[in-house]
Structure formats: structure tokens, C-alpha cells
Image: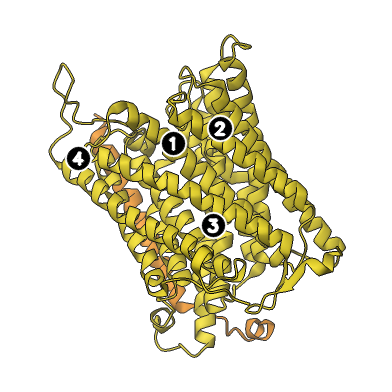
Chain colours: A yellow, B orange
Amino acid sequence: MAAEAKLRTCSVTGLQVHLPAQKLIMTNAVTAVVFLLIGTVMAILIALTRWPAVHLLNQEFFYRFVTAHGLNMLIFWIIFFEIAGLYFGATILLNARLAKPRVAWACFVLMLLGAALADIMVFTGNADVMFTSYPPLQAHPLYYLGILIFAVGALLACLLFFATLVLAKQEGKYDGALPLVTFGLACAAIIAVWSLAHGALTYVPALLWSVGLMKNIDPAMYRLTYWGIGHGAQQINLVAMIAIWYLLGTLTVGSKVPSQKLSRIAFFLYLPFINLGAIHHLLVDPGLHSPFRIFNTSYAMYLAVVGSMIHAFSIPAGVEIAQRAKGFTTGLFQWLRKAPWGTPGFSSLALSFVIFGFIGGTTGVIQGSEQLNMLAHNTLRIPGHFHTTVVAGTTLAFMGIAYYIIQLVGQRKLIWEKLAKFQPYIFSIGVVIMAVGMLSAGSMGVPRRHWDVTFADANLPVSLGERIYGALGMVGIGGIIAFVGALIFILLAVGSLLKGEKIA
Amino acid sequence: MDEEKKSGKMKAPGTLVLVFIFLAWFAALYFLNWSVLSRLWSIG
């Protein structure tokens, strides 16, 4: 069949949609949502265990589910969705076709196989090593193999994204620079290649060690390369999320970015600098000397922060310019009051932007400073930070764009549109309560990834003070609200694809 | 869009205010953390 015959024209946007790419986008996105469901169920069980009044799980299941939660949320949900985003950005946004759909299906199979293998190992108790799997903790070899297979699939998908951009250029689908959103996604894909290379450096030795082919593994070296993938993966999320923010701004209010060139520079700043910030995980590591730690977590990281500051201005400014052009010019904030707050795409954009910036971004920079890190290291402040970046930020932005993908790519109308209007608010309120609880408890010294901070079974009494119970109660209550918000999203997404009215 | 840029109409005063609110919040949190650190690890 000729390439042209595999295209359809979207009745809403007028964009050309490559049908094989459409199938791949939907398959990757739906698979992502399945892993989101697994991670969400783990999340509520963990939150109800960290709430001392409930303390739901026993210690064995707690640590097992913390491992599963990290893996399914931080890696499988987000990377499957990002691959869907890469195919979307390289094909639909460029009116182009996907370079090699069969290779893309092979990537999907590899990723699914790897993710399933790693999950099976975790849930059968063969990998109670937490998300970081720091040696000397050792998992079953199939756990490391599963992650490696997943990483190979994801890496090939990123390379296919680049191949599709080259093909689109050859076929004259764009002149000059890439559109801003696709440019942002390309930056995310470059960081992904960098991160996945660190994944190989980390997990190949770990696999060899687990099967006995390597006698010893250097824990310090493991930690260094691990955070290349461990935090690098979160930088992929960050950059992809910002690209999605620009896209949501365009889709919801017709956002007009003040300076495309400046926004591109901001994306570019992430490439050399943002991953250096990953060293903040090693700020108390005795194996690294101070100048190395200080350089990587301050001077270098701040250049990436400059990029974030540019986006922090450009994205709302783009919305304001578009709104003012529509006539909302009274005072300083009429454009904001008259914004489409009932559209889930816009509320997802606004809420994820504000929560990410005001809580996630600020706590990240503060906790990433060497001296201030001493206040927060290994306390519940750290999960408090990253639940406002990866959950309220990335996940909420992805939920917002998913509402459009369902309609524009899945060709289905949303079921229960009224419920969809409230979903971003419910989810955000829950995550904020939970994260503020974590940040507060962590500030009072409550450790992260800990089954029982009351130390009920300890021979010597240990007390972190009465106030921690209020903060940990917030973690539990916020967790329940966020769980409800996430379940509503999953219900809406799956329900719309199965039962939603078909759009021609 | 280019005409708007040339004529200087692409203004976002509301965003500018929001950005300064954000910077004030960031600065306050930053100094609060240094203050807590200095009290926990006092010198002398």
C-alpha cells in the first residue's frame, strides 16, 4: 500500500494522521495507562502504610510494593507514554509518516516484555531491592534482564523518532527548524539516549554480578552510573512535560509563545547541564570529592535552572498574549480569570505548571544545594519534592494531553465530560496535600522508604515527636484523594476508548 | 505575529507580576532553609 493511502485527515485539526503511527501511539498510551493503574494501586497501599494510624502493610509487602511503585510509575507509565508522545510529535505534528512501523512494534514488544519480566520478579518477591537496587542488595538476574530489555526497546524507539524526523525533512514536511513542541521532544529523546546509555553501564554489570560472572560490584561506581539513568529518566520527564505544556497551551487557548528562539535556547540548555544535577543524589557520598559535587549541583545545575526560568515566563506569557488577543485585556489578570478552567486540558496545564514550579521546582533547587541537602537527605522531604514534579507535574500534564489524544488520535469522545472537568482538580488537591505532608514530615526528620517511623518494635524507644503524626496523616489523606483522582482519569481514558462515541 | 512583535504589542504584564510573585516565594523558601540550617548547625 502506498504511504499516502495510510493517511487520514483529522476532522478537528486538519492534520494528517499516519494510520500505522496512530495505532502505535494508542497502543503505547494505553499500555502506559495500564502501568499507571498498577503503580496507583501500589501508591495507595504505601500511603496507607506510612500513615501510622492505619499502617496497612507488613514490612515485607511494604518494601516490595515501594519497589513496584517506583518502577511502574517512574519508568513504565511515563516512558511508554513518552514513546507515544515521540511518535505523536514526529508524525502528526509534522504531517509526516513514521519511518519504520514494524521496528516500532518490535520496540513496543521489547518494552512490554521487559516491563512484564521485571514486574513478575518484583511481585514474586525476587527483587525486594527498592527502585534504586543499590548493591549489596541483589535481585534475581531476570529483574536486571527485564529492565535491560525494556531499555533496549525504549532506546530503539528514540532512534526511530530521530529517523522519522530525518525522513520528514527529506519528504519536505518541514522547512528550517522543527516546530517548538517537536524540538522539545527531540531534546527529551537526546536526554533519553544519554540516560539509557547509563542504564546499560549500570544494569549490565549488575546482571553479570547477579549470575556470578562478576565477583564483586563497586557500590560507589554503581551509584554514580545508576543516577545517570535514575535521575536522567526524570529529566526526560521534565523536558517532555514542558513540551507538552507548550502543546496544551496551543490546543486550549491558541497560545502564542513570545520568542520561539528563546524557548529553544531554554530547551537546549537542558542538554549539557540538567543531567549534571543528578549528582545531588550523591551529596553525602564519601566516594566523591567536594569540588566535583559542588560544581555539578550548583554552577552547572543552575544553567539548567535558567532554562526552566525561561519556560516559566514563556508558557504563561504565551497564554496571556493569546487571551489578550481575544479581548480579555482588562486589568492585569482578566486573561487568567477568563481562561477555560473547565477544560481539563487547560486546568491540567495550569495546575501542573503552578504545582511543579511553586513546590517541585523550588524544593528541587533548594534540596539540590550541597549544604541544604544535609537537611533533607534521605528524609521524606525528597519524595515530597518529586511527587510534585513527577506526579503533579509530569503525570498531570500527561493526563491533560491524554484527553486530547483520546479524541484526536483515538477518535472517541470523552464519556462523562463533567467528571473530566473535575478530575485534574481532585488529583492535584490530593497530591498537594500528600506532598506537603511529606515535606513537613521530612523536615521533622522522618526518613523516606521506611516501614515504621514509630519504631514500635525497637528495643530502645525512639521518638520523632508528636507533630509527625499530623504530617503523616496528611500523606494518607492526600494519598486517598490523589488515588481517587487517578482512578477517575483511568476510568475516563479506558471507558472513552471502549465506550466513547466515535468521531469521524 | 511578526507585526505584533515589531509594534511591541506582545506584552504580558500579568505574567510579569506572576513571575515576580514566584521569585519572591522562591527567595523566601531559600532563605528559610538557610535559616533552619544555621540554627541546627550553629557555629561558635
Q: Secondary structure at mark 2?
A: helix
> At x 60% / y 41%, what residue is drawn?
A112
Q: Secondary structure at mark 1?
A: helix
Q: Amino acid at mark 2?
A: Leu
Q: Label 4 is found on which chain of the structure? A: A
Q: Are marks 2 and 1 in contact (CB under 8 Å)?
A: no
Distance in Å between CA atoms under marks 4 and 3: 34 Å
Residue that sits furthest to the front in the current view: A499
**Residue A487 rendering spot, x and y as whole percentages:** 38, 56
Task: State left or right for residue A42 relative to residue A172.
Answer: left
> At x 36% / y 59%, what residue is drawn?
A485
10 Å neighbourhood of mark 1: few (<14), some, or many (≥20)? many
Name the residue carrying label 2. A117
Q: Secondary structure at mark 3?
A: helix
- Upstream in sequence: badge 1 or badge 4: 4
Q: Nearer the viewer, residue A335 or A203?
A: A203
The vertical placement of A58 against A37, above or below, is above
Q: Label 2 is found on which chain of the structure? A: A
Q: Are marks 2 and 3 in contact (CB under 8 Å)?
A: no
Q: Amino acid at mark 4?
A: Val
Distance in Å between CA atoms under marks 2 and 1: 12 Å
Name the residue carrying label 4. A54
Q: Amino acid at mark 3?
A: Met
The vertical placement of A99 against A222, above or below, is below
Distance in Å between CA atoms under marks 1 and 4: 21 Å
Q: Secondary structure at mark 4?
A: loop
Labels 2 and 3 in the same subunit: yes
10 Å neighbourhood of mark 4: few (<14), some, or many (≥20)? few
